[in-house]
Image (cartoon, rainbow, N blue to C red):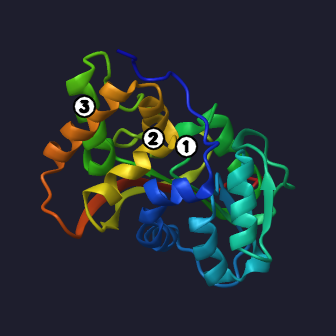
Amino acid sequence: MTSQPACNTFTAPAESYDRLMGRYLPSLAPAFADAAGIRGGMRLLDVGCGPGGLTRELAARAGAGQVAAIDPSPPFVAACRERNPGVDVRQGVAEDLPFAGAAFDAALASLVVGFMTDPARGLGEMARVTKPGGTVAACFWDPGRMPALGIFWAAAASVDPAVTGELRRPGTAPGELAALLTEAGLLEVRQDVIGARAEYAGFEDWWSPYTLGVGPAGMYYRSLDATQREAVRAECRQLLGRPIGQFTLEAACWFAAGTTPHPDR
């Protein structure tokens, strides 16, 4: 059988991402913004904005003209721009942000650090474009408390013993985001756990997004043949253990934020 792909790019349509991970953003985005202390009057940057779930929350709080967003995926950039008129949405990577130094009051990265090519450099760039005394904040899934992914990879491993689940990514272990922010030069680093949830109409509503090629799970599914796909699907249904009808899954993210230093300190 085919083992998990070693790399990942988000090239699927934005609507496919919406169905897999985007459905957590209506609860995650406000929780993240609250934890980061985002309020009206701030100039804000959303790094790795995806289709714009967090961007929407930032624009609602500060005004679209106060928000910039950036992502490497062309379909996500197009969707974010369409969904958030007035926001400065650009295509690019965290490790080389096309913004002037000290341009923002806060820079945020939601579910992104683990996918950065160089997390220390990416967070360093976020600090560079944030004003002295401003905030750099990040959140990323705690794999042990993200059942939507945990169930899929447990099912995959039962069918293919070579699969170990999501690749080990920076930011997924306790204290790791805080350590990365400290390494990037942020001060007064604090950390916490924030929650998110998603509603599902039933098993098929939960399962079908995995077939769309989104993220590592979607890429792994696409690498399987028809027999393997059906075996993973059947095992997911058993592991999920949900009756027919609507249900909710709760998830948790590691959160960390720090303050950018003043040049004379």
Residue in view at x 23 percent, y 42 percent = 236
Q: Nearer the viewer, residue 16 or 81?
A: 16
Q: Residue 186 carries which label?
A: none
| Numbered circle sitting on residue 171 | 2
For disc 3, the marked residue is: 231
Q: Who is closer to the viewer here, 62 or 69?
A: 69
Q: How crowded is mark 1: few (under 14 residues within 10 Å), some or many (20 or more)?
A: many
Residue 264 appears in the figure: yes
Up the image or down, 202 lies above or below 145; here it is: below
Report the amino acid beneath label 1.
Answer: Val
Amino acid type, label 2: Gly
Query: Which quarter of the figure is the N terminus placed in?
Result: top left
Q: Residue 113 carries which label?
A: 1
Work out whether 74 lies above or below 42. above
Secondary element type, mark 1: helix
Q: Where is residue 76 in the image (x, y as percent from the top left)?
A: 68, 54
Residue 44: percent from left, percent from top: 70, 68
> Hey, which quadrant is residue 87 in on the image?
bottom right
Alpha-carbon span between mark 2 and mark 1: 6 Å
Of the two numbered discs 1 and 3 in the rendering, the one whose residue sits closer to the viewer: 3
Which of discs 3 and 2 lies nearer the camera? The answer is: 3
**Residue at (33, 50) in percent of width and height:** 207
Kind of residue at disc 3: Ala
Q: Please tell me whether mark 3 sits on a helix, a strand or a loop.
A: helix
Distance between the alpha carbons at the discs numbered 1 and 3: 32 Å
Instruction: Count the numbered circles shown.
Output: 3
Residue 108: x percent and y percent?
Answer: 60, 59
Q: Is mark 2 on a helix, strand or loop?
A: loop
Residue displayed at 61% across by 46% down: 12
Q: How crowded is mark 2: few (under 14 residues within 10 Å), some or many (20 or more)?
A: many
Left or right: residue 193 versus residue 181 is left
